[in-house]
Amino acid sequence: MATLYIVSTEAHSGKTGLCLSLGLELKERGLKIGYMKPIGTLPGRIDDTVVDLDAYYVLKRLNTGDDIEHVSPIALTRQFMAAHFKEEAGGIDVLIKHAFASVSEGKDVVLVENGADVNEGRFMNAAAFQLADLMDAKTILLVKFRSELVVDDILEAQDLLKDMFHGVIFNQVTSNDRPIVDTIISYLEKKGIKTYGVIPRDRTLKAVTIDEIAAHLNGTILTAADKTGELVENFMVGAMGQEKAFRFFQTVANKAVITGGDRADVQIAALETPTKALILTGNFQPSPIVMAKAEDKGVPMILVNLDTITAVEKTDELVGRVRIHQDQKVRKFRDLVRSGVDLEALFTDAGI
Amino acid sequence: MLETLFCPTGVAVIGVGREEGSVGHEIFDNIREAGFKSRYFAVNPKAKEIHGEKVYASIKDIPYPVELAVIVVPSRLVPQVMEEAGEKGVKTAIVISAGFKETGIEGARLERQVIDIAQKHGIRVLGPNCLGAADTGCGLNATFAKEAPGKGNIAMISQSGALLTAILDWAKAERIGFSKIISLGNKADISEIDLLKALKEDDQSKVICAYIEGITQGREFMVAAEDVSKKKPIIAIKSGGTDAGARAVSSHTGTLAGSEQAYNSAFKQSGIIRAGSVEDLFDYAIGFAYQPLPKGRNVAIMTNAGGPGIMATDASERYNVSLAAFNRETIDALREVLPPAAGLYNPVDVLGDAKADRYRRAMEIVLSDENVHSMIVILTPQAMTEIDETARVIVEMSRSFPEKLIYACYMGRADVSSGIEILMENRVPNYYYPERAVATISTVLTYVDYVQRAVGTYEHYAVKQRRVREIFDDALRLNRRNLPDIQASQVADAYGIRVARCVLAKDADEAVRVSKGLGFPLVLKIASPDILHKSDVGGIAVGISSEAELETAFNRIIDNVRRFMPQAMIWGICLQEMITSARETIIGMNRDPQFGPLILFGLGGIYVEVMKDVSFRIAPVTEQEAYKMVTEINAYPLLRGVRGQPGVDIDAIVDTILRVSQLVTDFPEIIEMDINPFMALDKGKGGVAADVRITIGG
């Protein structure tokens, strides 16, 4: 049995997507797959048990047949951590080891997903470099490319993981950044670090559903309730006159427009251009005739009890922290992994 | 077309309440009182008799043919009523009832349902949520307006029903009559386009007036309006021209208010006369409806008061109306009949003591002059003035000279009112102030020019459409909405627009090598797909005249761009020959949601940005319109050449406007395009696009 441990340099780097892509790939090759996320950073309730929601989603998609308690043995809720700081409970590593044993039973490959970075979980002896050893795993570092300085993070990971460090995959690399990333890859090679691939940045993966927006803004859906599963890639604010708004909105597709509920002019301009949703601020009910038009065009209107500035700030929080919990996003990410990562080399080196 | 809306055989009002004051009851009464020539029926399942006339339980029970159904039942019952109307064989329905799209999602659904049923039965629908329609020729008043329209030959279409009732009340006081009035309501089926087409063929309507808030099928509207304008004038108020007004329009109608420039251009190109207010609308309407179109541009002014005569003269000059120069014989004849102190030239001052007879003699002489095509007759009430008698003289002259346009200007209010009554009843329009009479003549003359203008021709250039398609497909694949200028220039080039030669250099050494082939002076422009406004990031250098300067400028631009936009991808720097001794102009385009591509022309730099001295047209433009775009800007004399300066190559500008027009018509995905500057060279030398920007959408 082989164990691949997917670790990242920071949160929201694409680990869940990578685990899913690798898992689906291996499954298609006829291998028995296990998956676990020892430390859950996205706690949520499933059937009254607190588990990691990313782990729950991957479990369902990969259909490994394991219990969620083993797949996600620990979810870092505030209560859990507070309790731990008050009275340091030992044996977390044992708990994880036990769960891992259960998940790996009868499997050919187990994919293990880490939390935010190599150090996360150190306070309970469950950081990546500690767990990798425990599970005898080969560690892949997923690096979200922000700047040249990510090299420091990679070198730190190499120091901590030592011979369990297996290689690097870069993610979210724009075409502008590609030349510098190539230079970094050569540099890493000289340091004995292998790069298995580069995954380009893709807008659709950053998209959020209208449901997610509505939930995040605590808004009410007024129109086109059947279209709230659609993905929004861009947010635009409408505070100008209709003519300017129309010209501004024309150039951006798959967007949500944030404007006052009383701004019928901006709302109509948005509805006449490629718009996926309208976020109406100030809790001003829109004009009935405009609502009828939105319904007709299948554009959900989300009424929120926030002013426009706050609504913009809150939607900003959403962007870049989105989850991959949509089939179309998983498909897209898998395509990117297939074309950007040398899977054969990765699997062969990992002994799969 | 739409005859069954105005002159149907058999009308049924469905939903005639027993109580007076209910909408259905009022409509039924209005139909009874207007003296409708065909039969009319009341329908109400709960009533037996209204005003002694039988009430039917359903439209299907009426034992006579019914072509028009006027539906006034609660909105939820309209689908069923429409179904029954269809079974009865109704051709047109006026849905007065509210409670449809204007009330929200459920209402919109109901409206669609009603229209689906109507379409199944081939019924055309006016409304819903409207005041109704009236035709004074057939004596049909299927409205719930308090006032019935008087008979006349002005047709009035309104997107606001309530405005119509105000207009009817006001028109009654002014003795203005109508051929037809139509309230559009929600425009679920019948739109202003249908009505324009129908009114074109309507002999009773000499003029069409319209109050418009928003149009959805702009291009179709223009085509219909252009066709109608050739036959009769269309005068329109378009509201929602300001930001706040647009908000009100969108909230009221659920449509875009549309850009002022686009509406102005669309109206201009399709011959529609735009009125700024209801007052203007009726000034123009009676000016057209009551008098003939003049055979020429020359106006005579006759007055019994010096001051108002001068005011009229000033107005003529301001409104570009030419004052007639009289024949020698006219002046001699006037000298014979007028007192020595009278003014014999234009304006003709018949003096304050003029009685009706003096007006008559002077008018006869002046109207007989073949240089006079129109006349404004001004009257102020002095003690000896014969107000009514003079009005009768003016009416008589108007009949004796049926080819000449005559407007009266009875100034005052109380004393002159009896004279105004005589004038207006006899189809001589009266204006209270000379300026308004002159403004109306000016409008009439603009219309005459439109009707008489040569039919425009559309140029069709041989172009490389496929090349442009490839460039756009590539850009869309890379999700690039703003084309990098190298690609934008290739697009322009594919359409035969001369573009300044531009060579890309990746570093300063290459730039120096390239410059040997190009020569100096040069313009340097950053080449990056991420930078749209090159000058904002220090990405441009002009007037580079040596290799040393070139090297410095090259490195400075790269440093600037790296500092301002560190993320931008840099391809290099474009070296472009610098065009000197040319006039900078701008040829631009943005796509209007209602009317399509709106082309702009102006002089570059401050003329566009500060003076807003630009002209607009909706594409495709004809060659004639393209010429007008160039000549109608205020700075045109600078292009033509002033004070010994040579003029620029206007043909090259026109040619480029036409090529841009063809390009943006061929490719609806172009949402913005700017050639700024387009360097217009001296006459005969053409012009060069120095910078091309294109944004694509879709």
Image (cartoon, coloured by chain):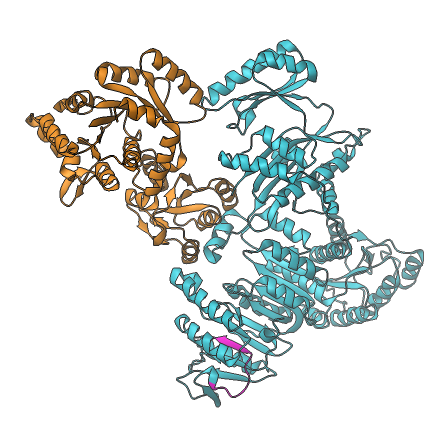
Chain colours: A orange, B cyan
Residue nearest the viewer, comparing A163 with B90: A163
For image coordinates 81% across by 53% down, the residue present is: B323
Above or below, B273 against A233 in this view is: below
Residue A138 in the image: above or below residue B611? above
For the residue pair B533 and B370, the one nearer the viewer reads as B533
Q: Residue furthest bottom?
A: B52
Q: Nearer the viewer, residue A196 or B626?
A: A196
Image quarter of residue B327: bottom right
Q: Is residue A277 left or right of residue B507?
A: left
Q: Which residue is farthest front?
A: A30
Q: Residue at x 49, y 33 (%)?
A: B478
- Tell me where residue B283 appears, x and y as whole percent: 67, 61
Out of B121 and B447, give the one closest to the viewer. Answer: B121
Q: In the rendered view, does B578 fall on the left or right side of B342?
A: left
> Which x, y percent locates residue B76?
39, 71
> What residue is rendered at 40% in x and 58% in y?
A288
When the figure is inspected, residue B496 is found, relative to residue B625, above or below; the finding is above
**Can you see residue B637?**
no
Left or right of residue B326, residue B238 in this image: left
Q: Visible in this render: residue A146?
A: yes
Q: How many marks?
A: 0
Look at the image and tell me in which quarter the N terminus of chain A lies.
top left
Residue B563 drawn above or below residue B271: above
Image coordinates for residue B302, horizontal then vertical, percent: 80, 60
Magenta segment boundaries in residue numbering: B61-71
> Residue B425 location in percent, x, y?
70, 73
Q: Quadrant of the C terminus of chain A?
A: top left
Q: Is B439 one of the magenta-colored residues? A: no
